[in-house]
Image: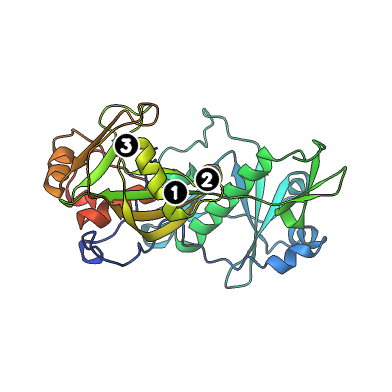
């Protein structure tokens, strides 16, 4: 399946055509800097002490939104507050400590109503989602938001034991759920997916459009890794299943968490000697090979839209293109 977008601002100086062996650097959601302090989670009294400490930094997650505020020099940062008495009645997760030693907690509150006066209006001082704010946040805040959202999504989907169906309780400072009947412990899971730029003998890039996507929306291919499969094998299988192309020389370029709701995207580039396309209509509405000049022209003519936001797809395209897509213009999705 084509993967939903991403974006990270880089200069032409930082980029080279696809032939480079360098991995992708500074991916938007791979920049976390907190010390997760995993050993502290074993202390059953940890959350109580942190909630009683006014120096603790609390991030309140409402649905998939965190509050942001304007920082120095026009930057965007996550808003924080001190603990409240009511926090003890909510799901609380210890995210770790920053370099200054401050503990960071996420408190999961009720989702915000779309017509709320606090709903995101695109400004820096607003409640926003990770897709909208990820690339504007600093390293520490991007990591905080990514981790908080991933864990909150996991808790929402794992309220009962998969072994016996009994309710589970939160332990280990929010990083484990324990069955109240059989005592089994259950840990957050991450589902790996591969995403790949596929290049033909003429150095053209393969773009695809999923059936549920509107006309003009194209991206590189992606898919989940199956049990017993290596990342490279998943790259080859997904490309062959979706567009009938056999690839080899799959090379790793980078990875980042993708907490929508619980994935990690592992980026590759791969080559094929035969560009013949045979599409699976269930997975792919259309696919096309484009040269760099054709891609630039299609963007300028508004024939295609390029991925934007925070995923690896845009970075993979730029890695092949040799410069940021913003240099070309065109619409994003």
User: Looking at the rendered structure, which numbered label has been put on residue 320?
Assistant: none
Please, is residue 280 above or below residue 50 in the view? above
Report the Cα–Cα distance between label 3 and label 1.
Answer: 14 Å
User: Looking at the rendered structure, which numbered label has been put on residue 226?
Assistant: 2
Q: Earlier in the sequence, mark 2 or mark 3?
A: 2
* CB atoms of marks 2 and 1 within 8 Å: yes
Please, is residue 180 above or below residue 322 in the view? above
Please provide percent x and percent y for residue 62.
60, 40
User: Looking at the rendered structure, which numbered label has been put on residue 234?
Assistant: 1
SS at mark 1? Answer: helix
SS at mark 2? Answer: loop
Please provide percent x and percent y for residue 112.
58, 34
Taking depth in this image into account, of 272 and 129 the one nearest to the observer is 272
Please provide percent x and percent y for residue 209.
31, 33
Looking at the image, the residue that sits furthest to the right is 181
Which residue position holds label 3?
243
Taking depth in this image into account, of 235 and 165 the one nearest to the observer is 235
Report the Cα–Cα distance between label 2 and label 1.
Answer: 7 Å
Residue, x 31% and y 46% (percent of image)? 246
Q: Give the quarter of the figure containing the C terminus.
A: top left
Please provide percent x and percent y for residue 236.
38, 48
Residue, x 49% and y 43% (percent of image)? 129
Report the Cα–Cα distance between label 2 and label 3.
Answer: 18 Å
């Amino acid at each position: 399946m084509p993967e939903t977008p991403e974006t990270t601002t880089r200069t032409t100086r930082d980029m080279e055509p696809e032939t480079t062996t360098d991995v992708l650097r500074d991916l938007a959601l791979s920049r976390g800097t907190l010390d997760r302090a995993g050993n502290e989670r074993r202390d059953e009294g940890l959350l109580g002490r942190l909630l009683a400490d006014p120096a603790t930094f609390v991030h309140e997650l409402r649905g998939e939104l965190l509050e942001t505020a304007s920082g120095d020099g026009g930057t965007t940062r996550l808003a924080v507050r001190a603990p409240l008495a009511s926090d003890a009645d909510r799901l609380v997760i210890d995210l770790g400590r920053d370099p200054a030693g401050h503990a960071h907690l996420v408190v999961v509150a009720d989702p915000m109503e779309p017509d709320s006066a606090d709903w995101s209006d695109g400004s820096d001082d607003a409640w926003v989602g990770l897709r909208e704010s990820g690339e504007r946040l600093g390293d520490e805040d991007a990591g905080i938001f990514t981790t908080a959202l991933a864990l909150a999504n996991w808790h929402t989907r794992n309220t009962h034991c998969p072994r016996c169906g009994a309710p589970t309780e939160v332990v280990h400072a929010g990083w484990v759920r324990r069955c109240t009947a059989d005592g089994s412990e259950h840990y957050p899971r991450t589902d790996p997916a591969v995403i790949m730029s596929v290049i033909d003998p003429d150095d053209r890039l393969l773009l695809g459009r999923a059936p549920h996507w509107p006309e003009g929306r194209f991206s590189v291919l992606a898919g989940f890794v199956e049990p017993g499969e290596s990342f490279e094998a998943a790259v080859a299988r997904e490309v062959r299943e979706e567009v009938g192309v056999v690839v080899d020389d799959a090379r790793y370029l980078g990875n980042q968490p993708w907490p929508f709701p619980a994935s990690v995207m592992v980026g590759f580039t791969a080559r094929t000697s035969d560009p013949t396309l045979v599409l699976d209509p269930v997975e792919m509405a259309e696919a096309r090979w484009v040269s760099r000049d054709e891609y630039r022209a299609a963007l300028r003519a508004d024939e295609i839209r390029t991925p934007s936001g925070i995923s690896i797809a845009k970075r993979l395209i730029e890695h092949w293109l040799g410069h940021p897509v913003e240099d070309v213009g065109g619409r994003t999705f």
